[in-house]
Structure formats: C-alpha cells, structure tokens
Amino acid sequence: MNLKKKITLLVIGISMLTLSTLAQTLDRPKLVVGIVVDQMRWDYLYRYYDRYTKNGFKRMLHNGFSCENTFINYIPSYTAIGHATVYTGSVPAIHGIAGNDFIVQSTGKSQYCTGDENVFGVGISDRNLGTGKMSPANLKTTTITDELKLATNFRSRVIGIALKDRGSILPAGHAADAAYWFDGASGNWITSTWYMEELPKWLSHFNAAGQPAKYLAQDWNPLYPIDTYLQSVKDNNTYEAAYNNSTTTAFPVKTSELMKTNGVGMIRATPYGNTLTLDVARLAVENERLGQRNVTDFLAVSLSSPDYIGHQFTPNSIKIEDCYLRLDKELGDFFSFLDAKLGQENYLVFLTADHAVAHNAQFLKDNRLPGGIFNDSKLKDLLNSHLQSVFGVENLTLSLHNCQVNFNNKIIETVKIDRNALLKSALEYLRSHDDIAFAVETDKVSEASIPAVIKEKIINGYNRKLCGEIQFILHPAWYGDSDWKGTTHGSWNPYDTHIPLLWMGWGIKHGNSNREIYMTDIAPTLAALLHIQMPSGCIGKPIVDLLENN
C-alpha cells in the first residue's frame, strides 16, 4: 500500500472516530427556564382558560406536558419554602427553610429566610440596608441549579430574577452567578456581595431608565371591557383591600397618582411587576448570553406580583382575573422571544407555583360555605394566661407564628419548668379551642391520631432547630389574618397546596398525567432530563409519566 492510500485511510479513520464521538455527545438543552408564579392556584389554568391566548398557558397545555395533580407535601405552604423545595427536591425538615421567617429555637430570635449579616447590598446607596443583606446561606442543601454547576465544572451560568429576594436567591442556589431582586424604596434591581461587588452595566443602565415609574404612569385599566369578566365578583367589593391612600378598589387603578405617596415599590401589587420582571429576564438572556454557548445555562424566574395582588384582592376579584389574562399574554411574548433567540426546541421550560391561596373567608360565609378568620395574637395571650395560671410564670409562649407554639425556652430553663407537663397543658388548651381541628407535639406526630396526609406534611415541615414544639391545624378554610379584607395561604388544604406544573420545549412531548405527584419531584425530574445528580437533600422521585412519554 502506497503512502497516499495510507494517509487517505488514516484521514477517513480519524473522521469516522470524530463523527462517532460527536454522535455520543450528551444531549442537553441550551437553556433551562424555571418559572414560579407566586400564589398560582392550579385551577387558574382552567378558570380563565377560555380567554387565554394560544401562546401562553395554552401553548404549554397543548404542546407541553401537564402534571395535573401536583401537591405541596409539607406545611406551612409559604413562599420561601416553596421556592426552596422546587429547586432542592427537599422539605423544611432537611433544607432548613422553615418559613418566610422562623424562630431559631436555641435563641428565641426570629430569622428571615435569606437574611445574612455577613454580606452587603449591591446596587443601593446604603450597602448596609437590610434589603441588600441577603444570601442563600440559610439553605442547608444544594439546589438543582447548584448541581448543574457541579456537573459542568461551573461552566454553566445560573441567574435568578424575582421582585422578592427569596424568590430569586433560593432558586438560584449557592453557586449562582447572580440573583437579582427589586428594592422598592429606590426602584432599583439589586443584589448582594455574595454574588458580586457591583452590578453589571446592563442592569445599571436599566435601573437608570426608571422603568417602574414609567409603567405606573400608565395606570392599571382592565385589559378587556369590565363587564366581560364573568369569572369574578363585581368590582370594588367589600372583600378587597384598597391601596394605601386610596378610598376605593375600583378600576381604573390610578397608579400614576398613587405612586406619588406610595412610591414605585407599589408596582409589586400590579401586573406591571410581572412586566418588569420579564424585562430583566430578557436582558439577562441577551447580555449574559444565556443558552448561547456550548453548555447548558439556567434562568430561574419568579413572578411575584400575583401574590401581592392575590393577598390584597382575593381569588374572586376582577384584579386577579385581569392579572392572569395579562400574564398569559406576557408569557406568550416571552416564549416568542426565546424562540427567536434560541429556537423553540433548544430550551426547556417548566412552570409551577410556590403555593396557592384560600378564598376570602367572608366571601365563603356570604355564600353559605364554611370558613373563618383566626386571631393568633388573641390566642397567644389566652394561652399565656392559661399557662401562667398553671405554672405561675408569665409569657411562656413567644409566638404562634406558622401555626406553631414557640416557647420561651430561656425562661423555661431558668425556672426549671417540667417541659412534658408544659406541653401537655398547652396541648389540652389548644385542643379545646373551637377554631383548631388538631394540635400535636411535633416530635411525636407519628403517634398522633390525625389523618396520614396531614401527619406527613407536619413531619416534612418540622425542623427541630427552627420550628415550635407544637403544631396546630385550623379547620378547612380558616386562616389567620388581621381582618376580613384580602386573603392568605399556609395550610395543608388543597386550595393552598394544589399547584400547576407544566413542562414545554426541549425533550418534552405533548401529554398529561393525573397521577398524584409532589413539589419535591420537580428537581429530580430535572436531574433525570439533564443527566446530572439530584440535589444533596432531595427526597423526591423523577416524574415517570413525563420521562416515559419522551
């Protein structure tokens, strides 16, 4: 064989080896986009379905995969825990985010979920302001975003964006390139020194443009004629809470005037908060070249405004209906942006919620349905009076926050009160209270005579170092609040814990499943799709129906 033929065969061999190697390259999306809609009930997918466009929620339902029976499997069902659980596949007992804030049992002091005195704000004039002193340090496990970083030797870029600090920081994880959140006082998007020493130029330029004030100057008018909002009660009803310095809740909402006294921070409680968040998300994709490199990136977006609007106006308000009709259009525009930038088969998106929400209790009562308001401050005083009559000591209960009895451990240890006797007396008193369905000692909940589904949620939500020794459960549709206006969430019940879960894009075929799955299953499903390790505290399982469908 002559030299020319040998060289030709060698070239062919090398080419075949190269092609074989390329064919075996691991297939992953260019970008993963996680969207958490704060306070979105599962039934909102269908309550307003007829008026959704084809490009938003309907696109995800018709082209993607819907997990129709997705539930939160812990209590309390609050924002910080939800975001932490979605991205860790874990629960408060393990990941350590036991509420938006919680009582550290060893000190009796309240701890905000992302508060960190060891970092400083970036992007605000006073770097010592509390709004900037935030980090993921209180999160005790890795996130799926951390695991993506580890799997790619930290080449992947991870960015979190949300109006709420906790909605940005916890999903982005510990190793994130950035987490950005909104400072209502200045109207700027900020971060902390956990991530960087100064904002990127693109975000500084955006802050300088004063976009929040520009949006609020437009006022909030209904997207459609107000008499066509058939899924809501009449406007300006007694269940809604007015904005500060306003005497009405009626449309149009004169945000152009209200921001003069309330500041631009009020954008949070308008649909423009979603618009602003997605503006920043687009800029991050463009300027950080997310999904435009040779490695998978992750963009974690939380849309916080539905929570502010929902708390203030309730699920049956025209404001909520309008919020979701607007959000539907905005999601459609965002997906179209990603299609053009990356190609619709090159990015994977999932959409879920951190929790859902209860109907306004007075609305339920007015419609002959069960429900009521629970006054935890009053109950705390009554419980302390009862315990004082038994043990002769004042203020043995510090707080009933998160429907937990947090005792004053320093006093108990100082005066040497028998803790078993204290627990027994407190439990007996709470169980006699008309508003309370169950009260259990959290360390012994497995022995309690309560339904298994509630028992499991208490166990998953109980972190001994950060939670009270007694958990009490209110009757369905009862919740703690200061008055009848607005609404809240936090319970074990389906109205608070049944959330949407939609998947679309790379690797996802159309389908749906009615099998019951849990919020903890999202992270391991992402791990299976991306072929990376599950987060370090993950207890969830991959969603087999979704994986087998693809």
Image (cartoon, rainbow, N blue to C red):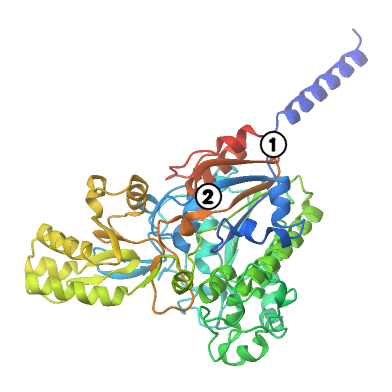
Q: Which residue is drawn at the image coordinates 19% and 61% (left, top)?
A: 427
Q: Residue 374 at what x, y percent from top left?
A: 34, 72
Q: Residue 550 at what x, y percent from top left?
A: 67, 34
Question: Disc 2 residue type?
Answer: Asp
Q: Residue 451 at what x, y percent from top left?
A: 32, 47
Q: Which residue is drawn at the image coordinates 17% and 71% (left, top)?
A: 396
Q: Residue 460 at what x, y percent from top left?
A: 36, 50
Q: Is residue 548 above or below residue 440?
A: above
Q: Give the side of residue 532 with respect to residue 200, left or right.
A: left
Tell me if label 1 and label 2 are in contact, CB under 8 Å.
Answer: no
Q: Earlier in the sequence, mark 1 or mark 2?
A: 1
What label does residue 27 carry, if any? 1
Kindly indicate the quadrant of the structure image that contains residue 403. Answer: bottom left
Q: Secondary structure at mark 2?
A: helix
What label does residue 525 carry, if any? none
The residue most toward the front is 368
User: Mark 2 — residue?
Assistant: 146
Q: Nearer the viewer, residue 25 or 92?
A: 92
Question: Disc 1 residue type?
Answer: Asp
Quarter that holds the N terminus:
top right
